[in-house]
Amino acid sequence: MSWDAIVIGSGFGGALSALPLVQAGQRVLMIERGGWVGRGPDNWGKSGAGLLTPHHTSDAAFRVSGAHRNYRASAWNCVGGQSVFYGAASYRFRESDFQHNTDVVGDSGAEWPFRYEVLEPFYARAEMLLGVGGQAGCEPGEPKRSTPFPQPPPPLSRSARRIAEAATRLGFTPSRIPLAISYAASGNRRGCTMCGTCDGYACAAESKNDLATGVIPDLLRQGMTLRANTVCVRLTAQTGRVTGVECVNRVTGERETFRARRVLLAAGTLATPHLLLASDLARVNPAADAVGRYLTRHRNAVVLGAFARRPNPTAEFDKQIAILDLYESAGSIQQLTPPTGLVKAYLPPALRTPAAIFTSHALGLLVIAEDQPRANNAVSVDWGSIDRYGLPGLRVRHAYSERDERLAGTLVEQARAVLREAGALFTIVHGIRTFSHALGTVRMGDDSRASPLDVWGRYRGLDNLFVVDGSALPRSAGLNPSLTIAANALRVGSHLAGTAVSQSGGAVRARRIQRYLPTMSIR
């Protein structure tokens, strides 16, 4: 069967770019390397922590080299992508994030090909689809909005109030973290139980609005076909077009090639350039040297404060408060729920009890500093190491600049001050080395020599290949990127759906996708 569109990946980029195409009546095939994540009481147990499930697998492991250590890392593979295990924070980037900033960009050539105003209506649509709850008009530097949040935030937990009051006494303006969580029951779905296992867990109550809970089931009901447990190993191309998507079934080992008029690549910031390089497609792009380069991942750290008494005795989900006063100069500070279950599961038996006691008496703050896009931070392929599917090995190289470390240090000191003001006896800092916020490896931009993608996410050199995941974002900003990935994917998918309508002249399809096509101006 020949498809109108093949979407590779089911995370924010894949699901949200597929939505306008499916709504337009196109035949869409979604290919996902992982399987469905089960939901139920087991998600609340220690084996429910995402890093301990089969969905965080060495099946797609990669080697990481950096300034201080080399290690082997595993990847997330499941229907819905990392949205299933993320903490639901759904921020819009600031208007300044889309403007030139020499301090961040340097000589990297990383520039957005449009301004915030172009993405704003798609931010609004993404917030509605994900049911984001927040409080408008309270954030320092908050960007302009055309619509209110779909729902208000819940009441503050005891520990969130403690953090907010301490931050206020220090002169900060604490605000609410916008979260993609359904707080009230609706239809056949339960409301949030405030169980405290959002960040790093699949939601047992299915009230966290991840893509596997909400968006993808709707797409399947509307006619999209999903092939789970299917590994994409090669894109074949001829005369400027992708002509085949070669895949391997993870369970049976069967090989199959799919064909479509368009291919939307959304495998993730590491896996997308991996597939492009494994398919030898960098050579057709005028920005070939940028394919796989300029990897960003945020300079993140967790600051934990230890308290004499349990600050959150009811174990509520307390990822509620953010401090954005330092955003333009350094980045963001966000409340974080200490992962007691995950810590216990990871540590040796002798350390589990004292670690559980410590985390139950701790409050956490996550600091996020935007890291510079640098050419040496990159992914590459190793043809000397071939996996069982026929893919070459993936190698990741990344180190932070002195500027990145300085900004993170500023945020850490302020986070420590807030925790001490809140009554912490002492604080400890834990660096984060995951790639959950990775971006930028196949970036879009106006300069065809510096950016592999054009303004619509089209891969230069191939007329029918589009990249719609985090790898397309040229800068990481200082906030969680999921909502921006979703909004940009909606923008690209809406553009492609509109193009299809104008070519076919289908009036019915035009009416069906009209709501996805707000007026846009691209500079």
Image: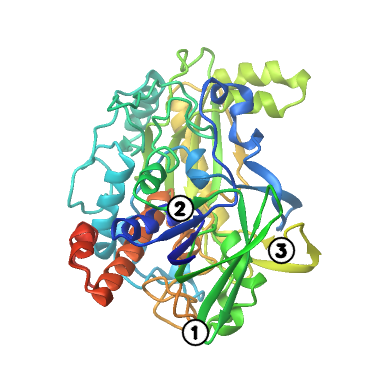
Q: Is residue 97 above or below residue 431?
A: below
Q: Residue at x 52, y 45 (%)?
A: 79
- Taking depth in this image into account, of 407 and 111 the one nearest to the observer is 111
Say what secondary structure mark 2 lies in: strand
| Residue hosting label 2 | 225
Q: Say which amino acid is labelled 1.
A: Arg
Q: Earlier in the sequence, mark 1 or mark 2?
A: 2
| Residue hosting label 1 | 449
Q: Position of residue 312 (x, y in %)?
A: 46, 17
Q: Residue at x 70, y 61 (%)?
A: 394
* Quadrant of the drawing holding the C terminus: bottom left
Residue farthest to the bottom, as pictured: 239
Q: Say which amino acid is labelled 3.
A: Leu
Q: Say which amino acid is labelled 2.
A: Thr
| Residue hosting label 3 | 391
Q: Earlier in the sequence, mark 3 or mark 1?
A: 3
Q: Position of residue 203 (x, y in %)?
A: 47, 30
Q: Earlier in the sequence, mark 3 or mark 2?
A: 2
The circle drawn on residue 25 is none
- Camera-nearest label, 3 or 2: 2
- Marks 3 and 2 sit apart, C-alpha to C-alpha, by 25 Å
Say what secondary structure mark 3 lies in: loop
